[in-house]
Image (tube, rainbow, N blue to C red):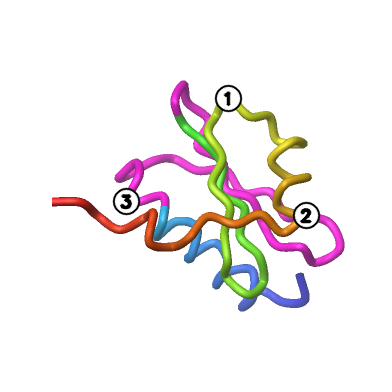
Amino acid sequence: MDDADTHARLVEQGRRLFEVLAPGATLNTIVLDDGAGICLLHTVRGGGKIYVAPDLSVLFVASTLDFQKGLEAFLAGRRTPLEKFERRS
């Protein structure tokens, strides 16, 4: 990641999406190598991970999938449609 603004933008995207899934969740952030983006982790049972690319596309993976497997899928281009994060009434 080149700068603090880019990093903040990616973190904000991930936090906004996690807020739909787990309001108020405590999240950890990992910066991915080679400018690939970031990963936000909700490290509780039933939590998950959201990988965020520089273009703000994302991949959500459940906590049952380990970090490396999720990263491989993310780097291979797999994404979660943003519509999946819409609040349901």
Q: Which residue is mark 2?
A: 76
Type of the residue with mark 2: Ala
Magenta part of the chain: 18-46
Q: Which residue is mark 3?
A: 20
Nearest to viewer (mark 3 / mark 1): 1
Where 78 falls versus 27 (above or below)?
Answer: below
Q: Please tell me the numbered disc located at residue 2.
A: none
Type of the residue with mark 3: Val
> Is 27 within the magenta?
yes
Residue drawn at the location 13% of the way across and 51% of the way down: 89
User: In terms of image quadrants, where is residue 64?
Assistant: top right
Residue 45 vs residue 5: left or right? left
Labels in figure, total: 3
Looking at the image, the residue that sits furthest to the right is 34
Where 48 falls versus 9 (above or below)?
Answer: above
Residue 74: x percent and y percent? 70, 52
CA distance separating discs 2 and 3: 25 Å
Residue drawn at the location 58% of the way across and 66% of the way down: 57
Nearest to viewer (mark 2 / mark 1): 2
The secondary structure type at the circle numbered 3 is helix
Q: Which residue is mark 1?
A: 64
Type of the residue with mark 1: Thr
Quadrant position of the N terminus in the picture: bottom right
Residue 25: x percent and y percent? 38, 41
User: In terms of image quadrants, where is residue 41?
Assistant: top right
